[in-house]
Amino acid sequence: MTEDAARAHLQIGQVAERTELSIKTIRHYDEVGLVTPSARSTGGFRLYTEDDVERLLVVRRMKPLGFTLDQMRDLLDALEVLDDADSGPDERARASAIVLDCRTTATQSCEKLRRQLDYAEEFTALLIARDTR
């Protein structure tokens, strides 16, 4: 690997810092084939590109919304199809349907989380009002 190629890649610790995911989680995503590093060092260490980091950030955003690993994989694949100018119309239509489905699910999940946060804040306010110190 050339020096320029090595500089273009990030090691797993750097990726963990950038994505706020643990090294263990990033390794797990590699093991299940969700986000595979683009390269390996001569010593076998995982090396990631900016595109890999972006994929991990998509996964990080999906995780708190309750998406499964399969749904995450489907969305990542769909986004790749939509980014590929050589994708055919049928393939693009399927990919667009997956993105729309994920958007609907994400919107519903956000609404649920907002309600839960409202309840948590109401409860906290109740406890503050009852503070007996």
Image: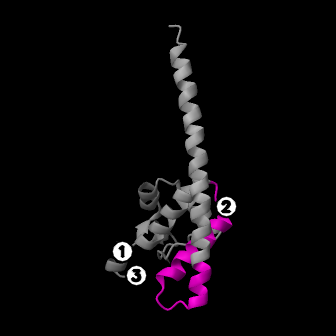
In the rendered image, residue 76 lying in the magenta stretch gets the answer: yes
Write the start and end of the magenta stretch as one range.
66-95
Local crowd size for mark 3, using a 10 Å CA cut-off: few (<14), some (14–19), many (≥20): few
Q: Viewer-proximal residue, 88 or 10?
A: 88
In the rendered image, residue 72 lying in the magenta stretch gets the answer: yes
Disc 1 designates what residue?
A: 8
Disc 2 designates what residue?
A: 68
Residue at the spot 60% in from the left edge and 52% down from the top edge = 109
CA–CA distance between discs 3 and 1? Answer: 11 Å
Amino acid type at mark 2: Thr
**The quarter of the displayed image where residue 34 is located:** bottom right
Sequence-first disc among 3 and 1: 3
User: Residue 114 placed where, x, y %?
Assistant: 55, 43
User: Residue 67 placed where, x, y %?
Assistant: 64, 59
Residue at the spot 56% in from the left edge and 91% down from the top edge = 88
Instruction: Confirm or deny contact between disc 3 and disc 2 (CB under 8 A).
Output: no
Q: Is residue 57 left or right of residue 66?
A: left
Vertical order, 22 against 87 (above or below):
above
Sequence-first disc among 2 and 1: 1
Vertical order, 24 against 9 (above or below):
above
User: Residue 3 placed where, x, y %?
Assistant: 32, 78
Amino acid type at mark 1: Ala
Local crowd size for mark 1, using a 10 Å CA cut-off: few (<14), some (14–19), many (≥20): few
Disc 3 designates what residue?
A: 1
Q: Nearer the viewer, mark 3 or mark 2?
A: 2
- Is residue 26 visible to the viewer in this orientation of the structure? yes
Q: Viewer-proximal residue, 11 or 52?
A: 52
Label 2 SS: loop
